[in-house]
Amino acid sequence: MPVIDFFYDLVSPYSYLAATQMARLEAKAEVHWRPFLLAGVMQATGNKPPFLVPARAQYMQRDLQRLAAYYGVQLVMPATFPFETLTALRCLLTLPAALLPASSLALFEAIWVEGRDVADPQVLKDLFGAEVLAQAGASAGKLALKENSDEAVMRGAFGAPSFFLGDELYFGCDRLFLLERELGLSGGER
């Protein structure tokens, strides 16, 4: 079975949209959910977030709503954007890999559907429990996040979401149809 590495950050609305579509890819490939720190990846590659470029920021609002409608999911911009995801990402990386998809989707929904602030430790405690939140500050979670971020940059990623099918990079949730085609799925049908 082919392997897809799915690199994402919770702060990225495009990563959220992509995450809602992973079940379709998981029917034909083994998808490895790989949280990374988008700010670190962008800094390492000289990329800028869309919200820092006025024309892109304005376009992004409409683009996100169109993509959400296309994918048939709800997307509500949080009251604070961008927001800090460091602790939430570290929480994810304290979990066994098998729990990453469901836990990531729960966090994405908390942010992009419910408007919850995952920078608030109480929100993370509610979602994961006190033990996972306490472990997020341990060196293992910090190291795993750094390793994922460094690996993504080394492989050519410059933003989120980034997908790797073998050595091939596919960037953005709007490139999922190309991954679907590579996997023999009929892309574009919703």
Image: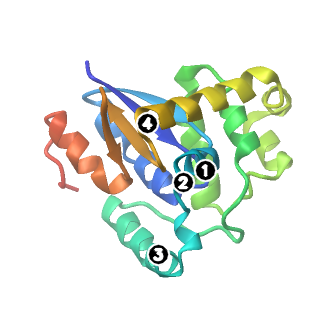
- Residue 6: give x, y in percent of width and height: 43, 36
User: Which structural element holds mark 1?
Assistant: helix
Comparing labels 2 and 4, the label whose residue is closer to the camera? 2
User: Which structural element holds mark 4?
Assistant: strand
The residue to which callout 3 is attached is 56
The residue to which callout 2 is attached is 46
Circle 2: residue type: Gly
- Residue 44: give x, y in percent of width and height: 58, 45
Q: Kindly report the distance in space between the C-alpha atoms of the residues bearing marks 1 and 3.
A: 18 Å
User: Which structural element holds mark 2?
Assistant: loop
User: Which structural element holds mark 3?
Assistant: helix
Q: Is residue 175 left or right of residue 95?
A: left
Q: Is residue 79 left or right of residue 161?
A: right
Circle 4: residue type: Phe
Residue 159 vs residue 19, the one in the foreground: 159
For marks 4 and 3, the one nearer the N-term is 4
Q: Kindly report the distance in space between the C-alpha atoms of the residues bearing marks 4 and 1.
A: 20 Å
Cβ–Cβ under 8 Å for marks 4 and 3: no
Point out which mark residue 6 bears. 4
Q: Kindly report the distance in space between the C-alpha atoms of the residues bearing marks 4 and 3.
A: 24 Å
Q: Is residue 50 above or below residue 89?
A: below
Q: Residues within 10 Å of mark 1 (few under 14, many from 20)?
A: few
Q: Residue at horizontal 30%, vertical 39%?
A: 24
Cβ–Cβ under 8 Å for marks 3 and 2: no
Comparing labels 4 and 1, the label whose residue is closer to the camera? 1
Circle 3: residue type: Arg
Circle 1: residue type: Gln
The residue to which callout 1 is attached is 43
